[in-house]
Image (tube, helix red, strand yellow):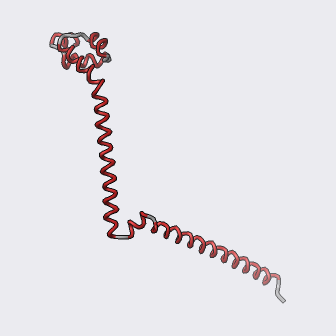
Amino acid sequence: MMTMVESYSLYLLMICNGVLAGAAAVAILRFQNMIKSQRSFWASPTGDAMSSKSDGDEFLQAVERRFTKFEEGLGNLSRDDKAKSAGPRSIPHENAVRMAKHGATVDDLTRSCGLSDIEARLVMRVHGNSATSARLN
């Protein structure tokens, strides 16, 4: 007959075998899932473009065309912003410069053109006549 230690050793050995068999089954399932995901990636347009050498150039050209369109869109946006900012905001500044050249005061520029005090003083220093600029100093 078997002793108590031998029977415990056999039970422990059977439990270890069961755990190892379970771990092996989990590893096999994970490996199968990994293979499925790899197959689906290489079947996708990105994987297909990466796998074939001749199509790789076409893929790069398509990316380059998209990038060029994106840059053109940004250029159009910046031109639109310039047009919007140049429109209504430039007219008060042009009027302020004209008024400063004809001897207007800082108060005249702030009231008539909607400039802040600092903006009006700057316009006077840059575009005002010498007598008006001397009064600001």
The residue depicted at 30 percent of the width and 51 percent of the height is 68
- Left or right of 43? Residue 28 is right
**Nearer the observer, 34 or 4:** 34
Q: Position of residue 17 (x, y in %)?
A: 69, 79
The residue depicted at 26 percent of the width and 16 percent of the height is 121
Name the residue furthest left: 130
73 is higher (above) or lower (below) than 25? above
Quarter of the rendering containing residue 116: top left
Q: Position of residue 55 (x, y in %)?
A: 34, 67
67 is higher (above) or lower (below) than 55? above
Name the residue furthest bottom: 1
35 is higher (above) or lower (below) than 59? below
**Which quarter of the figure is the N terminus placed in?**
bottom right
**Which quarter of the figure is the C terminus placed in?**
top left
The residue depicted at 63 percent of the width and 72 percent of the height is 26
**Tally of numbered discs:** 0
The residue depicted at 23 percent of the width and 20 percent of the height is 94
Quarter of the rendering containing residue 96: top left
Q: Position of residue 3 (x, y in %)?
A: 82, 85
Quarter of the rendering containing residue 86: top left
Q: Position of residue 112 (x, y in %)?
A: 29, 12
